Image: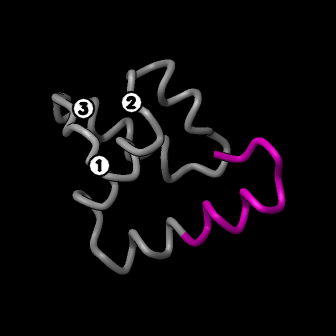
Amino acid sequence: MPRTPDLSASQLSEVIEMALSDHVGFSLIEQQHGLSPDEVKNLMRTHLKPASYKIWRKRVRDFGERREHYK
């Protein structure tokens, strides 16, 4: 299981906002915050409501199948 990152409230908010954006990939989040895709997914699972997390994961998967470099 991925580690839980030690982020300030503002960093946590920024990572969540970036992850929810359709225009920001996991690579940019990793570059700016040092979090792997698995760590971002774990963070989102922890901080979003279960239904919101499922919708987000479905959107990421669906877009990932359509776009080579999405998330």
Which is nearer the eye, 21 or 1? Answer: 1
Q: Earlier in the sequence, mark 2 or mark 3?
A: 3
Which is nearer the eye, 11 or 26? Answer: 26
Tell me the magenta residue range: 58-71
Q: Which residue is mark 2?
A: 35
Q: Earlier in the sequence, mark 1 or mark 2?
A: 2
Q: Nearer the viewer, mark 2 or mark 3?
A: 2
Q: Residues within 10 Å of mark 2 (few under 14, many from 20)?
A: many
Q: Which residue is mark 3?
A: 10
Q: Which residue is mark 1?
A: 43
Task: Identify whether 33 is placed above or below 14.
Answer: above
Q: Position of residue 15 (x, y in %)?
A: 38, 38
Which is nearer the eye, 10 or 66? Answer: 66
Q: Position of residue 56 (x, y in %)?
A: 50, 66
Q: Position of residue 62 (x, y in %)?
A: 70, 68
Secondary structure type for disc 2: loop
Secondary structure type for disc 1: helix
Callout 1 touching callout 2 (CB < 8 Å): yes
Determine the residue located farthest toward the bottom in the rendered image: 51
Residue 26 shown left or right of residue 65 in the figure = left
Residue drawn at x 28%, y 30% as measured from the top left: 11
Amino acid at the residue labelled 2: Leu
Amino acid at the residue labelled 1: Leu
Distance of label 2 from label 3 (alpha carbons)? 15 Å
Which is nearer the eye, 48 or 36? Answer: 36
Q: Main secondary structure of the magenta part?
A: helix
Task: Identify whether 9 is placed above or below 45.
Answer: above
Residue 69 shown left or right of residue 24 in the figure = right
